[in-house]
Image: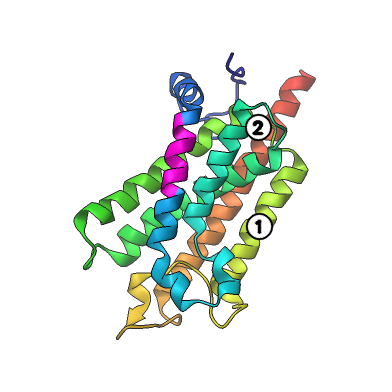
């Protein structure tokens, strides 16, 4: 039996109930697709891994880690495991990376020399990630501790990705528009725009997760 759908505001539950139900019924399949996406993502980052200090690797593959989180989240849901912190990480990660990547690809990078199929895949697969985020509220409680774990991880990522390098350089996904003569130039405006959008999305995802919890508490009191 699927978990009930609470009467939440449209901005925290924008998907039709039928689509949410379908996603929950196909949880095993969606988890498998996301695990495949995680494997592809790690392959996609192979050049950046090779160029980076191994200690920086956990901070580089943001999108593959987000798809790993939702895969684990869905598996935990199907197995009825208590993993609210994973659900919160999945929600914040999917919404953040699902909206950050299309912005960077369309507004900052453009297609450039990237193959058309890969360029389109990067945009649409990440938008699908953002949609996935909105089935999680059906089985997650978004406890304060769980949301704190998620926002802590993703804010720390924002800091080391754009502002304070830990191991030689900042660790964000390579942005093609930053490369000038084959060398990254973090002084360009595109770096600031990418950083600003990342921080905004971290705040937005955190707000939506907490808004979901607060609304549930208010409904329980009435």
Residues under numbered marks 1 and 2 in contact, where contact means CB atoms less than 8 Å apart: no
Packing grade of label 1 (10 A; few <14, some 14-19, many >=20) is some
Which label sits on residue 153?
1
Q: Main secondary structure of the magenta part?
A: helix
Q: Which quadrant of the figure contains the N terminus?
A: top right
Residue 178: image x %, image y %? Answer: 37, 76
Residue 191 lies left or right of residue 91; in this view the side is left
Which residue is more in the foreground, 53 or 91?
53
Q: Is residue 36 magenta?
A: yes
- Residue placed at 53% from the left, 47% from the top? 68
* 85 horizontally vs 116: left or right: right
Q: How is the image coloured?
A: rainbow
Which quarter of the rendered picture does the C terminus lie within?
top right
Of callouts 1 and 2, which one flags the residue occurring earlier in the amino acid sequence?
2
Which residue is at a point 21% across and 60% down the rendered structure image? 115
Task: Tell me, for residue 140, which label it has, or none.
Answer: 2
Determine the residue positioned at 24% across, 62% down: 111
Residue 118 within the magenta-colored segment of the rendering: no
SS at mark 1 in the image:
helix
Indicate the position of residue 211 as horizontal and vertical percent values.
65, 37
Q: Which residues fall within the magenta stretch?
A: 29-37
């Amino acid at each position: 039996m699927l978990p009930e759908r609470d009467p939440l505001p449209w901005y925290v539950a924008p998907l039709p109930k039928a689509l949410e139900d379908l996603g929950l019924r196909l949880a095993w399949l969606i988890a498998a697709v996301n695990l495949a996406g995680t494997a592809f993502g790690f392959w996609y980052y192979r050049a950046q891994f090779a160029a980076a200090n191994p200690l920086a690797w956990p901070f580089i593959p943001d999108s593959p880690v987000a798809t790993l989180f939702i895969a684990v989240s869905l598996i935990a849901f199907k197995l009825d495991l208590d993993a609210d912190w994973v659900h919160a990480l999945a929600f914040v990660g999917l919404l953040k990376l699902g909206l950050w990547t299309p912005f960077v690809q369309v507004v900052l990078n453009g297609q450039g020399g990237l193959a058309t199929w890969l360029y389109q895949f990067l945009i649409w697969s990440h938008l699908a990630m953002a949609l996935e985020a909105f089935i999680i509220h059906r089985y997650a409680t978004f406890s304060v501790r769980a949301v704190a774990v998620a926002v802590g991880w993703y804010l720390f990522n924002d800091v080391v990705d754009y502002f304070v390098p830990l191991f030689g350089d900042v660790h964000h996904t390579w942005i093609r528009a930053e490369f000038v003569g084959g060398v990254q130039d973090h002084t360009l405006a595109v770096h600031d725009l990418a950083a600003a959008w990342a921080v905004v999305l971290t705040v937005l995802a955190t707000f939506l997760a907490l808004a979901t919890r607060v609304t549930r508490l208010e409904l329980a009191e009435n």
